[in-house]
Amino acid sequence: MRRPSSTTISLLPASEDDIPSLIRVHMAGFAYDNSARLMFKNDDEYERMLLDMLKEQLSSPIYAVTKAISEDTGDTLGWLGCRFLGKDEHLESQGAVAGIAEVKNETKDQKDDARTLRLVLKKDSVRVQKEWMANRKYIHFNTLVVDPTAQGHGVGTALVRWITDKADELGIYCWLQSSQAAHGIYLKAGFKDVGSFEVDLREFARGGKEGKWGWGMYEFRYMLRLPA
């Protein structure tokens, strides 16, 4: 997709007809994110996961998927997926965080480091989310992605503001786990860091421990926003 000639966008609810363009934007937006590259064994698995995730979100009454489209071209430039949660609806997993060694032991017979990394992140995310958000109503930001050709034009900021304005109207909190790339956008929107989780990607990358491909530490940040 060519770089947009205008920054004028419209924010609209996404539908199942938008799934192909939402997948394209996601795969382009995270193409050079080291953690995302290790979440899946290949692009086919990545695309299948996105397809299943979007079908679930677009059919659920608690999810909202908002797309940003260029008013000049009609192209999808980015999208944000979130869910509106009541008390304890997010606590699908209980117990303390599992360390990398523990999760690797659970999956050692499958020889699937991609699945292992997903489990590591999931378990820690649930633990921290439970500590901060139990017995609260809030919006959980699941996905924010902008096409590389549209980055730097305020698309991500507009998508985040669209949802935080809703949260302010409802008087509820916002919660998320941020990638390194999106951290600055969330800070500008009033989110505060309340924790972090640092992962050594060399533990999961083939040849990573030998220093191949430049794998290293990756920090995920847990962020909270209070209603205005």
Image (cartoon, rainbow, N blue to C red):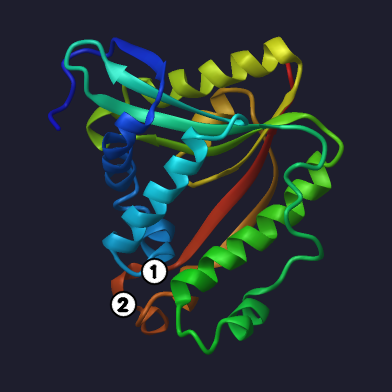
Which residue is tagged 1? 215
Q: Secondary structure at mark 1?
A: loop
Which quadrant would residue 168 be assigned to in this image? top right
The x, y position of residue 18, in whole percent, is 31, 30
Whether 169 is drawn above or below 128: the answer is above
The tag on residue 168 is none
Q: Residue at the location (62% across, 85% down)? A: 105
The x, y position of residue 189, in whole percent, is 57, 23
Instruction: Name the foreground residue: 49 vs 32.
Output: 49
The x, y position of residue 106, in whole percent, is 63, 82
Q: Mark 1 packing: few (<14 Cα in 10 Å), some, or many (20+)?
A: many
Instruction: Name the foreground residue: 2 vs 199.
Output: 2
The tag on residue 212 is 2
Q: Quadrant of the N terminus?
A: top left
Q: Residue at the location (55% across, 24% down)? A: 188
Q: Quadrant of the C terminus?
A: top right
In this rendering, position of residue 91 left or right of residue 200: right
Q: Residue at the location (84% across, 42% down)? A: 134
The answer to whether residue 194 is seen in the rendering is yes
Residue type at tag 2: Lys
Alpha carbons under labels 2 and 1: distance apart: 7 Å
In this rendering, position of residue 66 left or right of residue 197: left
The answer to whether residue 228 is seen in the rendering is no
Q: Residue at the location (50% across, 46% down)? A: 179
Tag 2–tag 1 contact (CB < 8 Å): yes
Q: Residue furthest front?
A: 59
Instruction: Name the foreground residue: 4 vs 73.
Output: 73
Residue type at tag 1: Trp
Q: Secondary structure at mark 2?
A: helix
Which quadrant would residue 154 be assigned to in this image? top left
